Amino acid sequence: MPDWSMHCIFLTWGQLMQLYEALNIFFEAMKGIRSPATILFYRNTLTCLGEYFGNCDLRTINIDQLRAWRSTLVDRSNLWGGRSSHPEQPGHLSTYTIHKFVRAARRFFRWLCLENLLEIDPAKRLELPELPQRIARGISSKKKSRLLDAASSPRDVAIIMFLSDTACRRGGLAGLRLSDLHLKRREILAREKGRGGQHKERQLYFKHKTARAIRAWLKVRPARLGDSLFGLSPDGIYRVLQRLASKAKVVDGWNPHSFRHATIRKWLAAGMPLPQASQLAGHSSIVVTGDIYGRFNERDLRKAYRKYS
C-alpha cells in the first residue's frame, strides 16, 4: 500500500510525474473543497489504481490499460482487499461498486488535465458500466412496526419515529443538536452533507407521536451528551438499527436510507408536489428526486392506472 502522506511537489508538462505523487496532489487539493467523506471515498477507490499500475509515469497510462484495469474489477473473486478491518471474503464486486471505481478514476484524470498536470486525459473514453434500474421502495410499514416492537429504550423508539417522519439522512440524525430542537413547533434544524465539510442546513418537521417519543427520551437522556440530541455517530445509528433488526428478525430493508426512501415515497403518493418533496428531502434539485423516486413497482402503477384512467 503506498504512503499517501508523502510530501507532494507540483509539476508541469514535460516533467516526470509518478502516479503516487499525482494521487497525493489530488487528495490534498480536495481538502476544504470536498467533504472528508468524499475525500475518503476517493482514497478508498483510487488506491487500487496504484495497486494495479504501480508507481509508474502517468504519461504511460492509456485507455487500453485503463479498460484492462476495469476488467480486473469485474473478474475479482474477493469482496475486500485483505485489509485488517475488512478481511477477504469470496464474491464479486457489484456493478454499483465498479461504477464508483471507474467514476473516481475518470474524475482523477480529468482533474489532472484541468490543472495542467497532464496533457492528455487517458480516461476520457473510459466507459462506465450501465447500472440496473432499481426501485427505491424503502422499509415497509410491517417491518417498521417490528423494529418499534423490538425497541426497548426511549432513545431507540425516538430514532425510529424520527427517521419515519423526516427522511433525515444518517449523518444528519447523528448531528442533531438539542439547542436546535423546538418541540412545540415540532421541528429541528439538521446539518447534512455538503462540500468541504460545510454541512447544508435544512429544517425538519415531525408529527405529534414523534414529539412524544422525543420527550420520553429527554426525560432519561444523560446530561453527559451535551448538546447532541442522541449522542450517536452515524455508525452508531446504523448499529442501533442493525441490533433491532436482528432482534426483530428483519432480514433486509432496515437501514437508515430505507426509512428515507419510504418517507419520500409516502409524501409523493399522498400528492405532495415534487419541488416541495425535493426540498424537504434535502436534494440538490428536483431532477435528483425525480430520478430516484420517479420509478414505481407494478402494484403502484396498477393502482395509479385504476385511479386516473
Image (cartoon, rainbow, N blue to C red):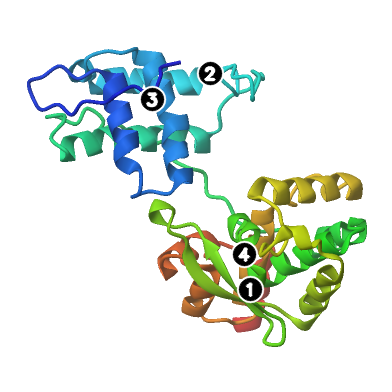
Q: Which residue is mark 4?
A: 168
Q: Disc 3 and disc 1: Cα gap in Å?
A: 38 Å
The label shown at residue 179 is 1
Q: Disc 2 marks which amino acid?
A: Arg
Of the numbered discs 3 and 4, the one sitting upstream in the chain is 3
One can see residue 223 in this view: yes
Residue 128 appears at what percent x and percent y? 37, 37
Tags 2 and 4 in contact by the CB under 8 Å rule?
Answer: no
256 relative to 21 in the view: left or right: right
Of the numbered discs 2 and 1, the one sitting upstream in the chain is 2
Q: Which residue is mark 2?
A: 76
Of the numbered discs 3 and 2, the one sitting upstream in the chain is 3
- Tell me the mark number nearer the camera, choosing from 2 and 1: 1
Residue 237 appears at what percent x and percent y? 71, 51
Q: Quadrant of the C terminus?
A: bottom right
Q: Which residue is mark 3?
A: 5
Of the numbered discs 1 and 4, the one sitting upstream in the chain is 4
Tags 3 and 4 in contact by the CB under 8 Å rule?
Answer: no
Which residue occupies 67% across, 87% down?
185
One can see residue 127 in this view: no
Q: Disc 1 and disc 4: Cα gap in Å?
A: 18 Å
Residue 48 appears at what percent x and percent y? 43, 22
Which residue occupies 64% across, 18% down?
88
- Tell me the mark number nearer the camera, choosing from 2 and 4: 4
Vertical order, 104 against 63 (above or below): below
Of the numbered discs 2 and 4, the one sitting upstream in the chain is 2
Which residue occupies 77% across, 51% down?
241
Q: Disc 3 marks which amino acid?
A: Ser
**Hey, which residue is sitting farthest bottom in the picture?**
184
Q: How many marks?
A: 4
Vertical order, 161 against 234 (above or below): below
